Amino acid sequence: MTLEKDLEITEERIAELKKRLGVIWRPRQPYYNTVATRDSIRHFCHGIGDTNPLFTGEEYAKKAKYGRLVAPPCFLYSVYWPAQGRGMPGIHAWHSGDDWEFYQPILEGDEFTYTNTLMDVKEKESQMAGKTLIQYHEITYINQRGELVAKALDWCVRAGRRSSAEKGKYKEIERATYTADELKKIYSDYDREEVRGSSPRYWEEVKVGDELTPVVKGPLSLRDIIAWLMGAGSPFMRAHALAYSFLRRHPGTDMMDSTTQQMDVPELVHMEESRAQEIGIPGAYDYGCQRISWLGNLVTNWMGDDGFLKRLRAELRRFNVIGDTTWLKGKVVQKYIKDQEHLVDIECWAENQRNEITMPGFATVRLLSKNREGH
């Protein structure tokens, strides 16, 4: 059981955390997926509602560029989440953003290992929780050929759970309600989604100011969160003896529900109202990795089978609670040639039904050129 005095940030705990700076951590056992199989790719896509046939249509993929199934870039979340503030157990970690760089496609049959390195620790004061820390980690993903497939710089905000609840910055969030007409509009937006697919999007045809066809996710339900976990896995969600063994090895990772006095993993803030309220959020909310994967869905829909996502950055600014609807949107802000690659920069973001931008983002995509097809 976590002691109350351990639930706040102290100078001693900060000093202990900083001893990990620059230390490369490698896992003792797999986090979730280690291989991009037909099934693991499909489960991940189903978990985010991605309908791109390049990822799940075997016959379709055989006729595409690589001759086999491709995984969406954010599939690497199912290998390891770049969202975890390692160290300082009992201090809640809010995933606050990721900056991905992708170097190789993820193909059916590829195997992965990863490393996690604490890069920086910054102290600050927060409206939400008073004294907080921001931890920065770099995660690298290596395939079976020893190639660097991707790396992600992630950052998370650490704060005492009690302080967060007392500050109550987000307690005024109103739960979403919809009229029949509003729901009809959401469903019609689903029908308008476009997957570019096998029709190449040439660099020469793209114009600055072009808007990406929005992708809608929601209204968010517990079903969506469970589907995400089925596809992407979790560091904490283990059953029975395995769960208690994990908590014994990692004291302080548990969290008490004050209404029942039951101890369980902090990840239940994404599933149980009372757990979310313990840390000052009015209700259960989505996973940051989940929402960033939706942004990846938007970009891969737009770029087509021959495009390649080189960079995806997203900052998680506001909570997306059960009932909220999110539209993923984007527009082209720059096109250029660099190192013989034909590149497009995209400003992208997540916007809710309150017209709030909950996650600003940025992407860089390599496209085919009519003068250099296949590059």
Image (cartoon, grey):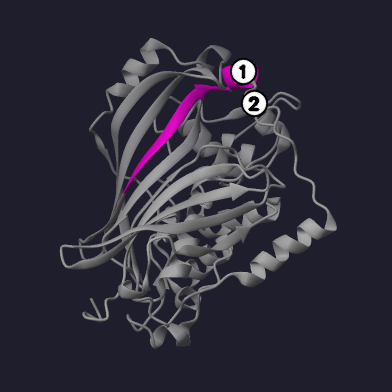
148 or 354: which is nearer to us?
354
Contact between marks 2 and 1 (CB within 8 A): the answer is yes
Report which quarter residue 280 is drawn in: top right
| Residue 178 visible here | yes
- Residue at point 37% right, 41% down? 154
- Dot 2 falls on a residue whose secondary structure is loop
- Dot 1 falls on a residue whose secondary structure is helix
Is residue 102 magenta-colored?
no
Is residue 158 magenta-colored?
yes
| Region rendered in magenta | 152-166
Q: Main secondary structure of the magenta part?
A: strand
Q: Position of residue 263 (x, y in %)?
A: 64, 30
- Residue at point 77% right, 59% down? 183
182 or 222: which is nearer to us?
182
Height in image: 42 above or below 316? below
Q: Earlier in the sequence, mark 2 or mark 1?
A: 1
Q: CA distance from mark 2 to mark 1?
A: 7 Å
Q: Position of residue 104 (x, y in %)?
A: 27, 65
Say whether residue 70 is left or right of residue 239: left
Q: Which residue is mark 1?
A: 167
Q: Position of residue 252 (x, y in %)?
A: 51, 26
Quadrant into which the C terminus falls: bottom left
Residue 280's mark?
Answer: 2
53 or 226: which is nearer to us?
53
Residue 261's mark?
Answer: none
- Residue at point 46% right, 83% down? 58
Q: Amino acid at mark 1?
A: Lys
Height in image: 20 above or below 43? above
